[in-house]
Amino acid sequence: MTSIDKPTDHRSAAPDADAPHSTTDADARAVTEAALFEAFGGVRGMVETVLPGLLFVTIYTINADLHVSAIAALAVSLVLGVARLVRRDTVKHAFSGVFGVAFGVVFAMMTGNAKDFYLPGMLYTLGLSLAYILTAVAGVPLIGLILGPIFKENLSWRTRNPGRKKAYTRASYAWGFILLAKCAILFPLYWWADTTQLGWVLVSLKIPPFLLAVWLTWVFLAKAPAPIDVFAEMEAAEEAEKAEKAAKAAKEQGES
């Protein structure tokens, strides 16, 4: 999979889910891959997620200095964020990592406990896991809210494309329970393990659960009907309205 700024192709009508696979199915899968990487930051996003925490725990393992470890983690996060801005990448990816690391640094500095560098991120993961599960139960799966605009379907999947709603619901459950399992490992370590043990386990759990959740999302969406391009529909409706007005004006001019 590769990271791109925008999906390059969408089908405006949802095909029969039981129809045989075709070239358009392969195109749709490629679009799904691109959309997932756009939504979650791609390979660079994964590196940016791991690097500050990895630097923090590496330095802390060597010298057990909270201040040096925290400042180094924040500095590398800022550099990565600025690099994204210079390349004019998506702003949310540029700042989300910086804010996450900054919260951890501030919290650890306030309490004087190096383990608290990880606590805000752990609490965020727990809250996110519950959000995925609860929105899926409520029939408004969070993953659909995230990916809908990227697929140019917005919320059309809720009422007009039940196959995609089902896929989004399954994907949200997958994200929720995967993240919840991650929390079930990390929170006991927060209480019982030391800073370096918690840090190395946390770093090792950054990418594998994420990749599993993304892969399951891709599997569910690749088998789902294509997204309904509501933007294309609105543009077509505007063009039809303009054509109707032009025809009406021409008719009135001919009669006068």
Image: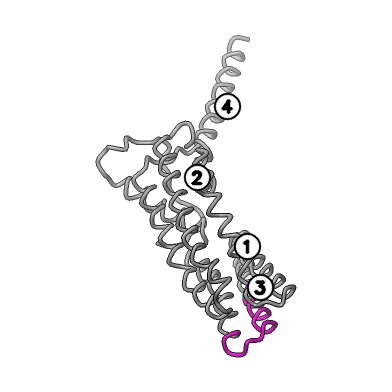
**Type of residue at label 2?**
Gly
In the rendered structure, which disc, 1 or 4, sits on the residue that comes first in sequence? Answer: 1
Position in image of residue 207 (x %, y %): 46, 68
**Residue 34 in which image quadrant:** bottom left
Tell me the residue at 48%/46% (across/down). Answer: 151
Magenta highlight on residue 39: no
Q: CA distance from mark 1 to mark 4?
A: 42 Å
Which quarter of the rendered picture does the C terminus lie within? top right
Residue assigned mark 3:
78
The magenta stretch spans residue 61: yes
Q: Which mark is residue 8?
A: none
**Secondary structure under the numbered disc 4 in the rendered image:** helix
Where in the figure is residue 72, as x and y percent of width and height? 65, 81
Mark-to-mark CA distance, 4 and 3: 49 Å
The image quadrant where one finds the N terminus is bottom left
Identify which residue, 153 or 217, lies in the foreground.
217
Where residue 242 is drawn, which disc sits there? 4
Judging depth in this view, the residue of 159 and 254 nearest the camera is: 159
Q: CA distance from mark 2 to mark 3?
A: 30 Å
Badge 2 is on which residue?
144
> Label 1: how many residues lie within 10 Å, few (<14), some (14-19) or many (20+)?
some
Residue designated by label 1? 96
Residue contact at pointers 1 and 2, CB within 8 angstroms: no
Question: At 43% from the left edge and 57% from the top edge, which residue is drawn?
Answer: 213
Q: Is residue 248 left or right of residue 170?
A: right
Vertical side of 229 occupied by 222: above or below: below
